[in-house]
Amino acid sequence: MKMPHSWQNHALAYASVGSGLIGASLSAAGGVSNRPIAQADPSMKIGTKLAGCTALALGLAHAVMVVAAPRVGGSPGQAPEPADTPDHIKLFLADPELGIAGRITATDGAVIYFQTRPTIDPETGAPSAVGVRIVDAEARTLVTTGGSSAGDVAIPVKEAMASATLLGELSAGLAEFDLHPALSVQKAALADAVGRSAARSPFDYPLVLEPSQVKAAAGDTGALVDFYLAASAGIELARGEAGMLKARFGDGLGYESAQFFRADEENEDGEPGRIDVYSRVLDRAGRNLGAEFGGDWVPEGWDDVLAAQAVDNRIHDGIASDMGAAAMALNALALGAKSSYGVAFSSELELASMQRLARALAENLLPQRDEGVVAAGEVVAKATGRYRTAIQVHKKWLVWPTEHSATRVYQHLFTTATSSTYSVTATINFCNHGTCAGGSGMSQKCSYTGPRMGSYRLPQSRFVPAGQTGAGTRHTCSSNYGVAGVNNHNCHDDSYVQVRAIRGLSYTHDGGRCKDWDFWATAPGCS
């Protein structure tokens, strides 16, 4: 089925408001091509674990035709007429599973950012509640649901009143949003929170509201199937050398993923043979937005992920637009994988990596505020740079008293050298030969946030000497891997070295924790 030209150039994101259209575009133009993903057939299937909804999985499994090209706005199959998108409203994300995120801007430059985040019932896989968060340009909380306002910074009266005006405009605009029917739950939750907050005094900020409750049957399976088949229609894919999956999401956004079988390395259960997945998402300038390293290898050409190059000219809206578009495309890939040439050869581990990256990207679409910032009107401590690196250690029990550990690294970019507001520009998961942060059974043990600097801190990559197998480089520990970690290294040794790298402390790739005679059974701390 040939798509209209306008769909070929805009795979995502239209939401009509009055006579205009809002949204960010996700072009289907791309340089990596075999055939579009949305060529569904009767054998198409997907695990309910990824779909999050049995009915949705069954619907996708029996979809046999390509529906209208993907879009945020309008009823299924309805194409919008070409129009300029108004500058005052922009959507970064609109996905039934991931939520809605965007911003609205006033003519005088005032701006507020909004996001909905669905809570999925682990028993049924259905949405049980939708949380909403709304912040101003300084990332000060205006509205939050299901949380607390403790520690939030007070907002000056003039700025609070400007935000209140924008909340009123957003409330009116939401009533006109012609969103895809699959987004009805997310739209209703956002409209409910915005409507309640718009009716309150700006002197009440930050507002803490009860989250919108969602009935499990609220979502329509047919609409979800239509949405996700359509959302994948413009993605172009190819399996390259050594099985590397390469995708183009449009507007220069790219994705790469590779699966490596390590016959001589053990899995988490101590059994020989393990599959490591490496994946990354690139923005339109070729910079990392999100990456996962399954083990110690660095795929060929990926050294730039660990190069920690600082870039000054990035702004929040551009970062969030890229992250949101990539998150939606990855989620559609994971959910509709078996309809696609290329992705059809993915293991469950590779599909799970796609969805973890999608969720990580969707979590970082609002500007954030430095923790511990003093109240408005007081002097902000002098900063030394715009770049900061943070790390979390995640863990899960294996067989007591042993654990598996992995880390997640965040790169922060502050608006200015003295600003308290920052954007998350990229995340990196170091899975350390097992389950990644955000994977099944994993929970956060601790975190560390580094100082503001002139660059980022990341574990260094090391060249693989001639005669050794691999893609050319390794990171963190360069010694052999083994679950026992005796005279080699295990996952906890990797995590330990990664924490030290982010803290700016010394470490060795081939000695110390990477090649000692101690068996470290539990996840390291962050201090």
Image (spheres, rainbow, N blue to C red):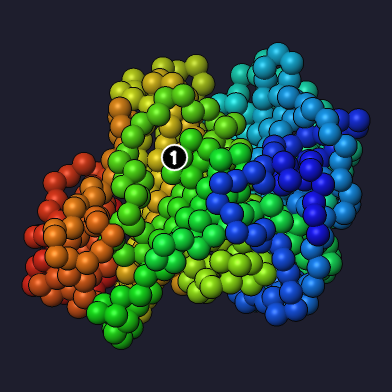
Q: Position of residue 414 (x, y in %)?
A: 44, 28
> In this orientation, which residue lies closer to the viewer: 523 or 58?
58
SS state under label 1: loop
Horizontally, residue 59 falls left or right of residue 295, namely right
Identify the residue at horizontal 53%, vertical 27% (top origin): 315
Residue 105 is drawn in which quadrant? top right
Q: Position of residue 2 (x, y in %)?
A: 80, 54
> In this orientation, which residue lies closer to the viewer: 423 or 192?
423
Q: Position of residue 334 (x, y in %)?
A: 60, 64
> In this orientation, which residue lies closer to the viewer: 381 or 490?
490
Q: How many marks?
A: 1
Position of 430 relative to 221 (above/below): above
Residue neighbourhood size for the residue with mark 1, other residues' Cα within 10 Å, grouped as few (<14), some (14–19), many (≥20): some
Horizontally, residue 70 falls left or right of residue 335, namely right
Residue, disc 1:
287
Q: Position of residue 167 (x, y in %)?
A: 77, 30
- Residue 497 visible within the image: no
Identify the residue at horizontal 22%, vertical 67% (top origin): 469
Position of 152 relative to 37 (above/below): above
Position of 427 relative to 376 (above/below): below
Identify the residue at horizontal 17%, vertical 70% (top origin): 480
Identify the residue at horizontal 53%, vertical 38% (top origin): 284
